[in-house]
Image (cartoon, rainbow, N blue to C red):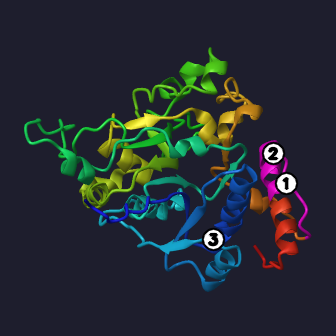
């Protein structure tokens, strides 16, 4: 009889990448919004050696666990001068290496959680390939492949499809990024269903990597790193999310927009037809200005966007609570 105690269960966490101080107010308010929404799971910060000591001290003061991850840069990288925010996003892929956790939901630091979404920790996803190989029966055929060398799984991660409308008309975006090809356009006639049902990713099958629910895997991480070394990474306009969409095409689970509600979706003429304030669980403040950029010198709100004001109100609440705890840094 085996008397060894069972191995402790690996925890589940939210995670967010932070590489520089100007995004730190976003991560700290994201952390507060998760607690405010009653999440049962902690947020961990993924940091690189580019984060100054003041940033690390801010995380420590608030009891936020952090892990140092390598800065990921492909050998063949595109010039992202038109969108400098993309230089750091390759590093988000390091989340697949966090095998100390059984489930990680990656959130961009320019997000605000409005409603509890702990259910993302339990949506069915495939176990990591290394576990499947250990459990595989020798008389069963190997998994099918998708034309590369990656076994074809159907639920490697979950994400919200990308909005491919290009509402700002950015000239460097692909010409195929049009409302006709956008996954959300097809939902305009059924806005009630759009609150709970994911759209078909559409002909482009693109995703937004602002939120990724995944099971970390050393095997998958190795495949991702190997894919980053291909010459065509220099052609990827949306770095990490283009790589994931191409490497795992047809192998990820689409989620409803409410889990990664891009602020641009609410705009008239984009996807205002499906946006419902009361149903949004998580707002994503893509592009500039960020909500923290719209705070005046005296801490007052200077912006005009209603949903950015949502972020500011939670930020003010966070700062007041931190003051009672003796935390009064610049963030």
Instruction: Tell me the CA gap for discs 2 and 1.
Output: 13 Å
**Callout 2 environment at 10 Å: few (<14), some (14 to 19), or many (20+)?**
few
What residue is rendered at 71% in x and 66% in y?
25
Instruction: Tell me the CA gap for discs 2 and 3.
Output: 30 Å
**Callout 3 environment at 10 Å: few (<14), some (14 to 19), or many (20+)?**
some
Queried whether the magenta region covers residue 191, the answer comes back as no
Q: Which residue is mark 1?
A: 313
User: Considering only order in the chain, which callout, 3 or 1, is on the residue closer to the N terminus?
Assistant: 3
| Secondary structure of residue under mark 3 | loop
Q: Position of residue 303 (x, y in %)?
A: 84, 52
Does the image show residue 171? Answer: no
User: Toward which corner of the image does residue 34 lie, by quadrant?
Assistant: bottom right
Q: Which residue is mark 3?
A: 64
Q: Which residue is mark 2?
A: 305
What residue is rendered at 65% in x and 35% in y?
265
Does the image show residue 236? Answer: yes
Q: Indicate left or right for 50 with 8 as reference.
A: right
| Secondary structure of residue under mark 2 | loop
User: Considering only order in the chain, which callout, 3 or 2, is on the residue closer to the N terminus?
Assistant: 3
Task: State the residue lying farthest toward the top.
Answer: 189
Q: Position of residue 289 (x, y in %)?
A: 71, 55
| Secondary structure of residue under mark 1 | helix
Q: Is 133 rendered above or below residue 277?
A: below
Q: Are marks 2 and 1 in contact (CB under 8 Å)?
A: no
The part of the chain drawn in magenta is 298-314
């Amino acid at each position: 009889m085996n008397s060894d105690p069972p191995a402790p269960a690996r925890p589940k966490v939210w995670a967010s990448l932070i590489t520089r101080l100007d995004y730190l107010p976003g991560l700290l308010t994201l952390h507060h919004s998760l607690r405010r929404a009653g999440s049962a799971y902690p947020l961990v910060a993924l940091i690189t050696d580019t984060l100054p000591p003041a940033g690390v001290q801010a995380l420590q003061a608030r009891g936020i666990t952090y892990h140092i991850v390598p800065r990921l840069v492909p050998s063949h990288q595109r010039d992202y001068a038109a969108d400098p925010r993309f230089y750091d996003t390759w590093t988000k892929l390091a989340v697949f290496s966090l095998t100390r956790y059984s489930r990680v939901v990656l959130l961009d630091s320019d997000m605000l959680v409005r409603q509890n979404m702990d259910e993302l920790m339990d949506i069915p996803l495939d176990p990591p390939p290394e576990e499947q190989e250990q459990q595989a029966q020798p008389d069963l055929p190997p998994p099918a492949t998708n034309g590369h060398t990656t076994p074809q799984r159907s639920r490697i991660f979950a994400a919200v499809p990308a909005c491919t409308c290009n509402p700002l008309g950015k000239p460097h975006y692909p010409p195929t990024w049009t409302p006709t090809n956008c996954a959300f356009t097809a939902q305009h006639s059924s806005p009630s269903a759009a609150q709970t049902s994911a759209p078909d990713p559409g002909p482009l099958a693109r995703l937004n990597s602002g939120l990724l629910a995944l099971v970390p895997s050393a095997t998958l991480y190795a495949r991702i790193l190997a894919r980053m070394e291909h010459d065509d990474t220099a052609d990827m306009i949306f770095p990490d999310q283009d790589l994931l969409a191409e490497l795992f095409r047809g192998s990820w689970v689409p989620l409803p927009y409410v889990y990664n509600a891009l602020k641009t979706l609410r705009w008239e003429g984009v996807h205002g037809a499906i946006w419902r304030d009361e149903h949004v669980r998580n707002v994503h403040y893509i592009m500039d200005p960020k909500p923290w950029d719209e705070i005046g010198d005296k801490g007052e709100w200077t912006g005009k966007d209603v949903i950015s004001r949502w972020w500011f109100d939670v930020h003010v609440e966070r700062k007041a609570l931190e003051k009672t705890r003796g935390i009064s840094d610049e963030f």
